[in-house]
Image: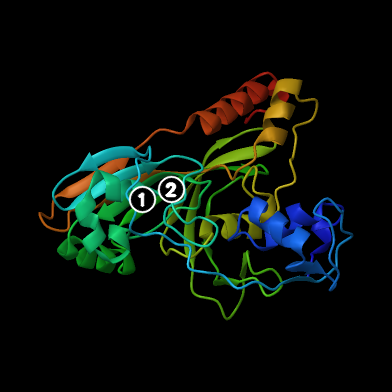
């Protein structure tokens, strides 16, 4: 069912939101062929919807995932030893193959860089980041490391901290302890729900702007879209995260450069900047930090400039 907030948009764009496991190009093919219908009717991809329509997809998928092919993929290698790798994943890179992303993922790049990872479950992947979230993740390089790192993650012994730019001016930090499960109306989203899995995010305010905030979010659990869901649930959706409530909020009388930047920021402003844990073999304490990617750094600098040129809105 098409939610009201997607009303007025093209069929292919709405389909890309509701069936985000598949590419927009593939969905357009299915719309044109009649495999994806609207209220049982075959429409053209450019037709605009009102909201409330029923989209039905009737296709038989052949296996498309490729966990074998080695491909030269550009990814940030922060650290590597015999037992593990630390990656600084760039924005736009999918972590592992799946529906709509058969190959050209981080996994395919890792297999090219270190072919022995093909012997490990999920090519050594311990945890993942969303396609449009940048930053640090750890990859096991041996079966022993995979077993131990997986256990450490389950026991919450891997420190994972994120930087997030939010809509809304947050006054104080907080712990958000709310269970998360799949959205009952929209399968591509998660939501706060009583029967969901426990989820805990610790939020600390780092900097306040006129109508936005820069916060640090520490994961105590690792649910799908956890930070995005939790911050949205308390009224502070991530800049650019329209799936979870971002509305393109603008400071009053903002300069056109900032307006364009905020309106054009097309991904969730979220970056996994810090990772800390004991080495699974040597027990040495490891800590890694990476700076913000250029798009988020530019966004923060623009918000700082806006605040500093409107002193009446500054703290104090």
* Residue 108 horizontal/vertical position (percent): 36, 50
Cα gap from disc 1 to disc 2, whole angstroms:
6 Å
Which residue bears the numbered disc 2?
104
- Left or right: where does residue 117 sit relative to residue 312? left
Which residue bears the numbered disc 1?
108
Residue at 48% x, 63% y is 64
- Left or right: where does residue 85 sit relative to residue 197? left
Is disc 1 in contact with disc 2, using a CB cutoff of under 8 Å? yes
For the residue labelled by badge 1, is the local secondary structure a helix, a strand or a loop? Answer: helix
Residue 218 in view here: yes
Q: How many marks?
A: 2
The quarter of the picture where the C terminus appears is top right
- Left or right: where does residue 263 sit relative to residue 155? right
* Residue 221 horizontal/vertical position (percent): 42, 64
* Residue 165 horizontal/vertical position (percent): 57, 41
Q: Nearer the viewer, residue 230 or 17?
A: 17
> How many residues crowd mark 1 within 10 Å: few (<14), some (14–19), many (20+)?
many
Where, by quadrant of the figure, is residue 74 drawn?
top left
Where, by quadrant of the figure, is residue 256 drawn?
top right
Q: Which mark is residue 14?
A: none
Residue at 65% x, 28% y is 314
46 relative to 41, above or below:
above
Residue at 85% x, 72% y is 39
In the current view of this chain or complex, which residue is farthest to the front? 33
- Left or right: where does residue 99 sit relative to residue 70? right
The quarter of the picture where the N terminus appears is bottom right
> How many residues crowd mark 2 within 10 Å: few (<14), some (14–19), many (20+)?
many
């Amino acid at each position: 069912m098409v939610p009201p907030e997607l009303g007025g948009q093209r069929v292919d764009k709405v389909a890309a939101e509701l069936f985000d496991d598949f590419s927009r190009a593939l969905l357009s093919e299915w719309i044109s062929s009649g495999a994806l219908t609207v209220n049982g009717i075959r429409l053209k991809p450019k037709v605009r919807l009102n909201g409330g329509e029923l989209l039905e997809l009737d296709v038989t998928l052949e296996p498309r995932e490729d966990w074998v092919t080695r491909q030269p993929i550009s990814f940030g290698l922060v650290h590597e030893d015999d037992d593990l790798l630390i990656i600084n994943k760039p924005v736009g890179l999918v972590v592992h193959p799946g529906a709509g992303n058969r190959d050209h993922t981080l996994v395919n790049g890792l297999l090219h860089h270190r072919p022995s990872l093909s012997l490990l479950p999920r090519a050594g992947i311990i945890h993942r980041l969303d396609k449009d979230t940048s930053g640090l993740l750890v990859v096991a390089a041996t079966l022993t490391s995979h077993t131990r790192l997986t256990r450490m993650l389950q026991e919450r012994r891997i420190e994972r901290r994120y930087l997030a730019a939010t809509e809304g001016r947050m006054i104080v930090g907080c712990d958000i302890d709310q269970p998360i499960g799949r959205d009952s109306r929209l399968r591509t989203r998660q939501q706060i729900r009583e029967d969901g899995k426990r989820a805990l995010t610790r939020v600390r305010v780092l900097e306040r702007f006129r109508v936005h905030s820069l916060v640090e979010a520490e994961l105590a659990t690792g649910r799908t879209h956890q930070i995005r869901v939790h911050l949205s649930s308390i009224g502070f959706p991530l800049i650019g995260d329209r799936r979870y409530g971002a509305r393109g909020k603008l400071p009053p009388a903002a300069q056109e450069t900032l307006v364009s930047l905020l309106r054009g920021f097309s991904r969730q402003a979220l970056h996994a900047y810090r990772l800390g844990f004991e080495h699974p073999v040597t027990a040495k304490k490891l800590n890694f930090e990476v700076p913000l990617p250029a798009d988020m750094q530019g966004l923060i600098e623009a918000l700082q400039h806006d605040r500093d040129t409107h002193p009446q809105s500054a703290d104090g």
